[in-house]
Image: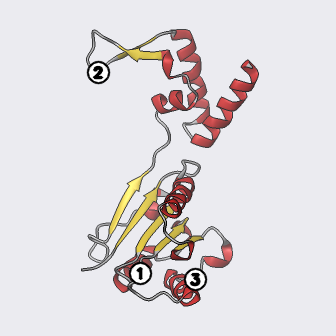
Amino acid sequence: MGGHAWGFAGPRRVGKTVILHQTIHGLLDSGIPDNQILFVSLETPVYTDIPLARFVEMFCQRFGHDKNAPLYLIFDEVQYLKLREVHLKSLVDSWPNFRFIVSGSAAAALKLKSNESGAGRFTDFLLPPLTFHEFLTFTEKAPLIEPAKDMPLGCRATVIEALNNWFLEYLNIGGYPAATLSECQKSCTANA
């Protein structure tokens, strides 16, 4: 039985790297030793021509890991690596007990097609920007909408003018978490 790789794809600034860092913190909090976790950002120019397998080999060599060690190997920004599908297939086949997680900014560049070489080896997750409702939750403006009792799946605005203003803000920001939180902080500071 072969291994598996998980991939996160989405536009820049949507939170992929943050999710990877949260994953690492979660692993550490659950008791996984730090020498069993590798994080490499391929955005660093000197890394873009190094095969992923070389990072794994150096990591295993450095800490004396064998092929059966429970390792977590996380590669951020894989869209910078040429032939990434081939690299990932090779990793998953060579080290089936390791857990590989990758992220990439361009969904088209990261999309690991269900072709013969990658079928069943990769699971992709698309991370889109925030929805308007998520934006309202982030900015603590969710009370501007409430469930409509007369519509099972509907909702209505509590203050339509304020909701419209926040919708314009959402359109300007684009639904990106960092920008949303930054705007929320500005708004909270201005209202304090």
Helix, strand or loop at label 3? It is loop
What residue is drawn where x is 50% and y is 16%? 144
To which residue does mark 1 refer?
91
Q: Residues within 10 Å of mark 1 (few under 14, many from 20)?
A: many
Question: Residue at label 3?
Answer: 50
**Mark-to-mark CA distance, 3 and 1:** 14 Å
- With 54 as the anchor, is 87 left or right in this view? left
Mark 1 and mark 2 residues within 8 Å of each other at the beta carbon: no
**Residue type (three-letter) at the residue carrying disc 3:** Ile
Residue 126 position, x and y percent, is: 41, 52
Quadrant for the C terminus in the image: top right
Task: Give percent across and percent down for residue 51.
Answer: 53, 83
Q: Quadrant of the N terminus?
A: bottom left
Report x, y in % for residue 121: 31, 71
Task: Residue at 56%, 25% (x, y): give it.
Answer: 140
Q: Which residue is mark 2?
A: 153
Q: Is residue 165 left or right of residue 125?
A: right
The reply, left or right, for residue 187 in relation to residue 27 is right
Amino acid on which the number 1 mark rests in the picture: Leu
